[in-house]
Image: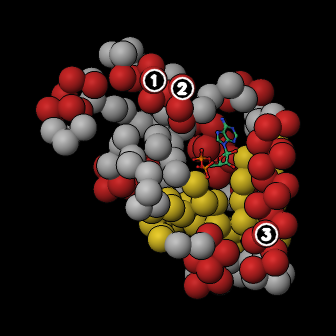
Amino acid sequence: MRIALFPGSFDPFTKGHEDIVLRASKIFDEVVIGIGKNSQKKRFFPLDFMVEKIEHTFAENPKVKIHTFQGLTAAFAQEIKAKFLLRGLRNTTDYEYENSIAQVNRNIFDGLETVLLITSPEYAYISSTIVRDIYRYGQTVDKYVPYLLPSFQEFQEKYAEL
Ligand code: ADP
């Protein structure tokens, strides 16, 4: 079984990410979206909140699974028997970064191949950072994420620690 791990922060998961997952699900038997938990970095969208949104997005797609993980991506890939790491490429900045982490990941877990899918042009400009910034200023982000988000005010009331 060809399992691909798509690791990331997904803070938030965007239509750009969704596009990569849908295209990869035509190549692999299973695509596991792995949300990395980083104790050094505080999330904007809480982990449970984002897991629920992603689960909802792929509810009808049995090939797509969602997990959270802590620690090394390569170690988690090994744990779930994923021989492929899936990443998206938008531009040369992504390429520089992906090139170096792909080498490191293959050194950690021999045989772990990174598969890079080139972004679809309509999503090339979407980044989680931009979506967060727009949302924070009270604008709708429906065009950029594949699920519904409450207004920023409602979101803040519910997640008071923000
Ligand atoms: P990380 O914090 O690991 O960079 P992200 O959640 O920002 O995680 O991104 C996960 C992966 O998705 C990365 O490979 C990134 O390049 C890719 N990606 C992000 N936005 C897009 C997009 N709009 N189109 C294609 N790939 C994307």
Determine whether, in the image, residue 142 is placed left or right of residue 157.
right
Where residue 83 sits, quadrant-wise, is bottom right
- Circle on res. 130: 2
Q: Secondary structure at mark 2?
A: helix
Rendering coords of residue 9 (x, y %): 52, 51
> How many residues crowd mark 1 within 10 Å: few (<14), some (14–19), many (20+)?
few
Do we see residue 12 in this rendering? yes
Rendering coords of residue 18 (x, y %): 59, 44
Rendering coords of residue 121 (x, y %): 77, 27
Q: Secondary structure at mark 3?
A: helix
Could you tell which of marks 2 and 3 lies nearer the N-terminus? 3
> How many residues crowd mark 3 within 10 Å: few (<14), some (14–19), many (20+)?
few
Where residue 122 sits, quadrant-wise, is top right
Q: Residue at x 81, y 78 (%)?
A: 107
User: Of the residues shown, which amino acid type is indicated by label 1?
Assistant: Asp
Q: Nearer the viewer, mark 3 or mark 1?
A: 3
Where residue 132 sits, quadrant-wise, is top left
